[in-house]
Image (cartoon, grey):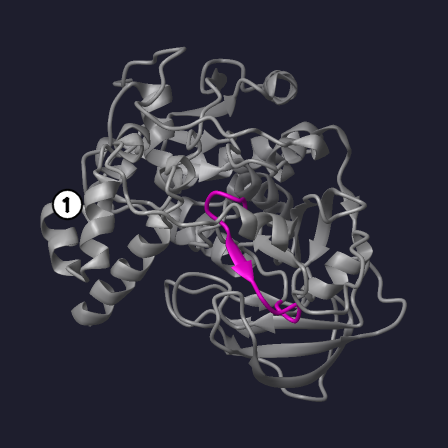
């Protein structure tokens, strides 16, 4: 077996050390009840929107497919509860634009049992069958990108994959959903890893976990031994706690000691990276032949009275989540609070509480809006170089920011490698002038994409 070298305490260059704020890590995952109405956008993934299979007035059961995938880079949508389809109409989304969505009126007393399933013998499945089963489940990357999981694992026939890297770092402050999944569902994680290894043809898997989660390392090691994978095919490795350790290129560098080439993907060096939450849920769903109807979400922040990690049914409106978690005046939009979906470094703020929980939502953070705004006084760039020292990709965020201010977007892409920025937020975090650098880069990328189409 021709593996890349393995370095135990290696790490990537630069990065930052934000305060972890992971107070929810010590409490078990709880289950959130159904809302009276669920809103299910037809696009909860990167790719073409799903195509509805149901119409208004139709009764459905939990787990039933409500929309089919429209092509390879698309996934289906499944009913999160028993109920009746109330409408298929435009609804607000976290990204801003209103999107076509299925509105499900949930029956009172709807069971948590998934009533639409097709159990499979996963050991008898060929790689192509595994990929199709993953697409049928509606699974996307649960780390936040929402890239269809089957597409992530569908490597070209000419590409040899030797290592599956499993991302258990969860380096974003506040978020603990992956940590709890590793502690509570390590055997499902092992099942998901075995399926992913078979799908891509990898001979080994390495699970990288930040060294502030040693209880998760111990739980995974015990599961590896319990399921008979302690022969070296699957290993778990603690890596130094540093942000953004969980970015796939950074984690590959930390675990394998090699860098993914600029503009390239991990598969170009024989590696596929997947999130622990994604693989744990796949390990649960695929043997039962079920679709994705819920996910674990960290609900926390200074504005939450009942913080924790929750199994949240997909489509649950944000105001329902906040009310259940103990937010005062949950029926009022915005007000004196700011709500961020995801982590504080890479997440996005939402203004409407009608936005639903979708497949890519890993966290819901509630902060005091006035306190945040007091910290947002902007000053001119003082050329201190802190952003350059922090950027894990070795870019020059200061120069990129100045070019963005002059709207010289082509220059940003052609000569300053804007495409290599994965918007981790390190530059914005360290900037003493509080310049929203990463937000400027997102705008620039969007404009360049628009010009290219």
Quadrant of the rendered image containing residue 4: top left
Residue 24 position, x and y percent, is 71, 34
Q: Nearer the viewer, residue 19 or 288?
A: 19
Q: Is residue 322 visible?
A: yes
- Quarter occupied by the C terminus: bottom left
The answer to whether residue 60 is above or below residue 72 is: below
Q: Which residue is mark 1?
A: 416
The answer to whether residue 146 is above or below residue 345 is: below
The answer to whether residue 34 is above or below residue 309 is: below
Residue 263 position, x and y percent, is 19, 43
Answer with left or right where residue 211 lies relative to residue 118.
left
Is residue 316 part of the magenta span, yes or no? Answer: no
Q: Which residues are magenta?
A: 342-355
Q: Is residue 163 visible?
A: no
The answer to whether residue 167 is above or below residue 75 is: above
Answer with left or right where residue 20 lies relative to residue 330.
left
Please name the residue shown 60% across and 84% down the image.
88
């Amino acid at each position: 077996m021709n593996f890349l070298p393995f370095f135990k305490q290696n790490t990537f260059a630069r990065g930052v050390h934000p305060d972890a704020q992971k107070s929810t890590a010590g409490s078990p995952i709880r289950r959130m009840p159904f809302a009276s109405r669920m809103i299910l956008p037809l696009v909860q993934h990167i790719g073409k929107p799903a195509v509805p299979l149901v119409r208004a007035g139709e009764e459905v059961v939990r787990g039933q497919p409500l929309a089919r995938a429209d092509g390879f880079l698309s996934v289906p949508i499944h009913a999160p509860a028993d109920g009746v389809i109330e409408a298929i109409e435009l609804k607000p989304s976290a990204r801003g634009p209103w999107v076509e969505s299925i509105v499900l009126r949930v029956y009172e007393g709807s069971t948590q049992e998934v009533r639409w399933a097709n159990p499979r013998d996963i050991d008898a499945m060929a790689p192509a069958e595994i990929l199709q089963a993953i697409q049928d489940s509606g699974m996307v990357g649960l780390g936040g990108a929402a890239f269809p999981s089957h597409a992530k694992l569908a490597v070209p026939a000419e590409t040899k994959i030797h290592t599956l890297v499993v991302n258990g770092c969860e380096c974003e402050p506040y978020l603990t959903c992956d940590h709890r999944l590793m502690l509570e569902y390590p055997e499902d994680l092992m099942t998901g890893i075995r399926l992913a290894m078979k799908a891509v043809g990898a001979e080994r898997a390495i699970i990288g976990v930040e060294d502030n989660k040693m209880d998760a390392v111990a739980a995974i090691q015990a599961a590896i031994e319990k399921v008979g994978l302690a022969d070296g095919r699957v290993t778990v490795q603690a890596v130094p706690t540093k942000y953004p350790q969980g970015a796939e290129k950074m984690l590959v560098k930390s675990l394998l000691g090699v860098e993914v080439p600029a503009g390239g993907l991990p598969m170009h060096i024989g590696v596929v990276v997947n999130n622990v939450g994604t693989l744990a849920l796949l390990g649960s769903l695929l043997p039962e032949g079920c679709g994705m109807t819920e996910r674990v979400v960290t609900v926390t922040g200074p504005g939450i009275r009942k913080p924790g990690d929750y199994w949240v049914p997909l489509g649950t409106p944000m105001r329902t989540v906040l009310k259940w978690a103990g937010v005062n005046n949950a029926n009022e939009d915005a007000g004196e609070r700011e709500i961020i979906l995801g982590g504080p470094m890479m997440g996005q703020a939402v203004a409407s509480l009608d936005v639903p929980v979708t497949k890519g939502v890993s966290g819901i953070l509630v902060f005091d809006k006035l306190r945040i705004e007091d910290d947002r006084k902007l000053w001119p760039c003082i050329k201190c170089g802190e952003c350059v020292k922090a950027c894990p990709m070795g870019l020059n965020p200061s120069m990129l920011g100045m070019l963005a201010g002059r709207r010289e977007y082509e220059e940003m892409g052609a000569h300053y490698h804007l495409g290599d920025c994965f918007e981790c937020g390190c530059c914005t975090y360290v900037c003493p002038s509080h310049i929203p650098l990463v937000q400027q880069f997102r705008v620039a990328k969007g404009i360049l994409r628009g010009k290219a189409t």
